[in-house]
Image (spheres, rainbow, N blue to C red):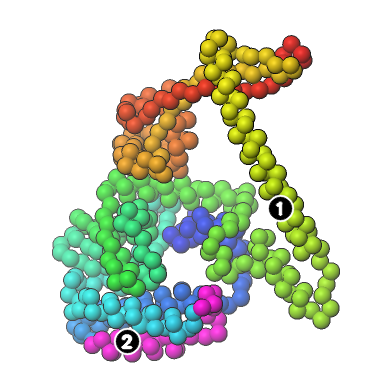
Amino acid sequence: MATYSHSKIGTFETCPLKYKFKYVDRTPTEDFESVEAFLGSRVHETLEKLYDLVRNGRIPDEQFILDYYEKQWTTNWSDAVRIVKPDLTADDYRATGRTCIERYYRHYHPFNQGLAVALEMQVPITLDDDGQYKMTGFIDRVDKMSDGVFEIHDYKTNQTPPSQEEKDQDRQLALYEIGLRDYFGEVRQVELVWHYVRADLEIRSRRTGQELEELRAKMIAKIQEIEAATVTKNFPACESRLCNWCEYRPLCPIWKHLYAIEEQAAQPTPLPDDGPALVNQLASLAIKRKELQTQADDVKAQMEQVEAAIIEFAKQHDYQRIFGADRQATVKHVTELKVPTKTNQLDEYEQMLALLRQSPLWLELTDFSSAKLKDMLGKPEGKVLRDLLGALVKQEEEWRVSLRKRKDEE
């Protein structure tokens, strides 16, 4: 069984095809690095240098650290660094990194919040007792606060910091905690600390033993999913905003025609390609479809009004089936279980999740969804969940109309 990392699993979740290119086929790519990744590496190197000096008894002044950052930037910069955003330059990003260092230095000087016992520490993560499922990770910094009490620190150069709720669900540092506890042995408490250096913001979070065990199970399930995809060779492409930074974009079936057009345009005599003509034809048809869709929406609204009238007619006369010229309408009174949703009932939704985690059936809801929960609630074994959730599960009654050909005409 291969050893996985959080980024490796994250790649599969973001785009299975990119995972295949990178980790299965090991497809060579154009040598490039996004400027965002380059900036993050330079900031990480500088803060690693800072704490390496501090733990060896020297507190460098701010200018020394800024000069180190500038040297790292100049030494490592190359034509392989790619800038995607057209309104920003390399100097803009360089200045951003410098500001990050300045803010961090002034916030934490004289850097005596804890004892840095490890920098850029590689930590093995064993997910199961048999040692079959393994991961590895690199921790930016581990601080020892007192006997048995540690902090895991992670530096982020993201432009927009996440919410506290998002970091309370974050997997990466929680996985590092699993590895850290095994590595150091006598660990009473671990605090997870993210430094969003652009915003000079610190976010902290802790995990319970139960949450760590649930995370182990989820990661094992995810690894099993990846292994199954490897056997079946099922790696679909998934489009997202991250496509702009993907090194495999010229090979991706979603994007490679765009590169083919650019390549043909660069030829002295453009090669024949019906692709653009087909796209133009499709665009014309899409406009027609939109016009028809508007008409369909009007018809749908009229149908809903008629269905409401049919339901009222059936209720007045105690009918379950109403016959027309060549069609019949069946009217049913159904009861459906409803559960809180994250979109419309966040407080109740979070209360429901907290209760579900106490249930022995929680592991069956690893990939949680309201549809999956409602399916389980409707089964005999779902009684324990219904009792657990109580008033959070509601029964809503509604009337439905289905239309089909008259049976006596068939």
Q: Is residue 383 magenta?
A: no
Where 353 falls versus 14 (above or below)?
Answer: above
Q: What residue sits 53% from the left and 52% below the top?
A: 226
* Residue found at the very far left of the displayed protein: 146
Q: Quick check: 357 left or right of 395? A: left
Q: Quick check: 342 left or right of 399? A: left
Residue 250 position, x and y percent, is 65, 68
Dot 1: what SS? helix
Residue 14 position, x and y percent, is 52, 57
Q: What residue sits 51% from the left and 18% below the top?
A: 333
Residue 310 position, x and y percent, is 59, 20
| Quadrant of the rendered image containing residue 280 | bottom right
Amino acid type, label 1 = Ile
Q: Is residue 65 magenta?
A: yes
Q: Nearer the viewer, residue 221 or 321?
A: 321
| Residue annotated with mark 2 | 66
Using a 10 Å C-alpha cutoff, classify the residue at mark 1 as few (fewer than 14 neighbours), some (14 to 19) or many (20 or more). few
Dot 2: what SS? helix
Nearer the viewer's eye, disc 2 or disc 1? 1
Residue stretch in magenta: 61-87
| Residue annotated with mark 1 | 287
Query: Real-space Cα distance between discs 2 and 1?
Result: 56 Å
Q: What residue sits 23% from the left and 75% below the top?
A: 107
Q: Quick check: 408 left or right of 317? A: right
Amino acid type, label 2 = Leu
